[in-house]
Amino acid sequence: MAASTQPLKVGFVPEHFSTPIHFAKKHYGLGAELIPFPSGTGHMITALRSGEIDVGIGLTEGWVAGLGKSQEAGDQDGGYRLVGTYVETPLCWAISTGINRPEIQTVDSLQAGKIGVSRIGSGSYVMGYVLADKRGWLVPTAGIGTGHEQASPFSETVVLNTFENLRKAVNSGEADFFMWEHFTSKRYYDNGEIRKVGEIYTPWSSWKIVASTALVHGEQLDPRVDDLLDKLNQGIKHFNENQEEAVEYISTALDYSEEDAREWLKTVRFPERTQGVDPKVVIRTVESLCKAGVLQIRKDVHGTEMIARQR
């Protein structure tokens, strides 16, 4: 790990949610090197473990799944720990199909269909099972104790890696539907490429901040991580107090429409203080990941041990 005088390398997803990070850098002297990961949280986990980045800001379920799998494998280090909360509100996942799929009109028509996902264990994968659980589609099997206590509610899980591939697949018939963040999907509803069937919210607050275990010593964090969290607090405060600047940035630098940027602002809430993570959120996420078969129900997975600093 670089000496403590070196700037942190911080991974983030370059979407509308990154606006307070941009403000922390632009207005409040955030000295970290910001590294975009458009492919998402799973890629950041790999980068953290390889030392490519020091900190990641991504989806709750991705971080928890990565640490849970490490615990199951007997690796109690896992490469990182949860140190902060970036978004308090749940994420709205839109459920999409192809524009010319007349046989798919309702969410209920997706049961036993082909679900497209970016990768196994990703948010798009996990939320398929959250949807199935909510709809009563999960079917218990005889394999109690195996860690996979329900049959798949879908006939096939099609791994497609990118958002573009997901959109193509529901139009070609390779997949019947996929789930992706609402406002990122909306522009493709508006241009007629895909069609919305429904939506579902995560049953947890949607974004967390993690740091490499090399920067975590019990509840004590490397001073650079504490400084990063303080700067993010300032970026969030600026975001809340300068909504027009946020709209301008989102609708120009991030390629969302002004209308969608304004609508998104009504739905999102960032914390006043990013420091710390609520253990109840992590435990709830672990429970959902076990239902999805991402984590094994009968294995010891300890949510609280994933957290460096609790709220």
Image (cartoon, rainbow, N blue to C red):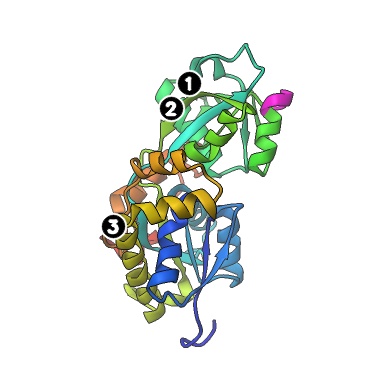
Labels 1 & 2 near each other (Cβ < 8 A):
yes
Q: Nearer the viewer, mark 2 or mark 3?
A: 3
- The spot of residue 146 in percent (x, y) is 52, 37
The image shows residue 4, relative to residue 153, as above or below, that is below
Query: Main structural element of the magenta stretch: helix, strand or loop?
Result: helix
Which of 185 and 62 lies nearest the eye of the viewer? 185
Tell me, yes or no, whether the highlighted magenta stretch contains residue 171.
yes
- The spot of residue 166 in percent (x, y) is 66, 35
The image shows residue 273, relative to residue 115, as above or below, that is below
Q: At label 2, which amino acid type do we have?
A: Asp
Q: At label 3, which amino acid type do we have?
A: Glu
The image quarter containing residue 48 is bottom right
Magenta segment boundaries in residue numbering: 170-174
Looking at the rendered image, the quarter that the C terminus falls into is bottom left
Work out how far the residue at label 2 is from the one at label 3, CA to CA, in angstroms: 39 Å
Looking at the rendered image, the quarter that the N terminus falls into is bottom right
- Identify the element where label 2 is drawn: helix
Q: Which residue is mark 3?
A: 241
* Label 3 crowd (10 A; few <14 / some 14-19 / many >=20): few
What residue is at 52 percent from the left and 32 percent from the top? 128
Q: Which residue is mark 2?
A: 133
- Identify the element where label 1 is drawn: loop
